[in-house]
Amino acid sequence: MNATFSFTVNTKQANTHLLACLLPAIPYLQPEQWQSLLLGRQGKQDGKDDQGHIEVDGEIVHADVLLSIGQLVSYTINDYQEAEVDCAWSQVWSNDEIVAIHKPANLPVNRTTRNVYNTLIQLLRRESPWLDAHLLHRLDLETSGLILIAKNNALARQYQSKLGTLIKRKIYRAVVIGKPEWEVNDFTCDLSTLDESLGGSRDKSAIRSQMHVVPPGEGKESRTLFRCLSSKVKEGKSYSLIECELFTGRKHQIRAQLSYLGHPIVGDKIYSNGGEFYLKRLDKTLTQADHERLITPHHLLHAYEMHLFNLWQSEVEQAEAIIIRDDDFPESWGIIGF
């Protein structure tokens, strides 16, 4: 496919040369490839060739020009290839400043080592009226559901500093393996990448991003209120639907805690089966038998509900929260029957 990217020069990029801004844009495009893309067109009649082209304010450029704030830089790369993802985002709620978006499972929110073009933020900038859309927070790659977006960079800076005030409640739903002995579990622990059970040294786990429950004071305090909504048996195995209300927002908090409690999320490649399938995915060695053991193509965790403090109304009206729900659960949830 031919992929076109664009960005508006901000204050940090102003008075910087074009190549210096482009080099970080696609991490696996080498400097000499950018040089070729920029400087190698001069013999072409229309300024383009089969590789692609770079434009500043709609004009094709052939020099490493100095950029000014507000300029629109676009670059097209022909025959661009990256991993296929589910691009079917949708708008759930919005006002004049922020938007609540449904993110499909397996769609990265921003660029990864495998995806730069088809990410949630790039899709929004290409397909929505919000050409300068910015994330207010993140969701893991395989997590589906609600995510808040600011309509431009200035609004993102404004709301990121008061996100804790804006979001009053954040509730997820997950399908886990097994049936908990509890109906309600208000669970608090410390989480860290330091695996204290292995001597307290970093990365004893082969998975660098994996979070572990550690002794109090040796990690970040993490609290989630879990409620078991229902359970069922399928092909001789028990599964449960769990509501998860976050009171802190640590990395992989719900996934790590549920795994520690003995009920990993269905399809979780890091926190079930000892992380075996995450490592195999990295090595691209997942087999059909592995996929059958995982049951679903992604983990079954969904950002279901948000309660927003109504910052845009009078003090009297602010008492009533804005409640947003995303009932668009991925089809994979039907494999278990929830």
Image (cartoon, rainbow, N blue to C red):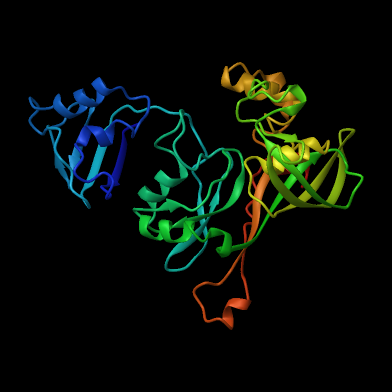
Evaluate whether residue 129 shows in this view.
Answer: no
Q: Residue at x 65, y 35 (%)?
A: 298
Q: Is residue 8 left or right of residue 149?
A: left
Q: Residue furthest front?
A: 217
Q: Position of residue 11 (x, y in %)?
A: 27, 50
Q: Position of residue 19 (x, y in %)?
A: 22, 32
Q: Residue furthest bottom?
A: 316
Of 111 and 266, nearer the camera is 111
Of 197 and 32, nearer the camera is 197
Q: Position of residue 58 (x, y in %)?
A: 17, 46
Evaluate whether residue 13 shows in this view.
Answer: yes
Q: Is residue 317 left or right of residue 33?
A: right
Of 195 and 323, nearer the camera is 195
Q: Residue at x 70, y 46 (%)?
A: 221
- Rendered position, 136 above or below 23: below
Q: Residue at x 20, y 36 (%)?
A: 18
- Rendered position, 8 above or below 92: above
| Residue 157: quadrant of the picture | bottom left
Q: Position of residue 150 (x, y in %)?
A: 44, 58
Quarter of the image containing the N terminus?
Answer: top left
Q: Residue at x 26, y 44 (%)?
A: 13
Of 234 and 75, nearer the camera is 75
Across the whole image, how many numbered discs are drawn on residues? 0
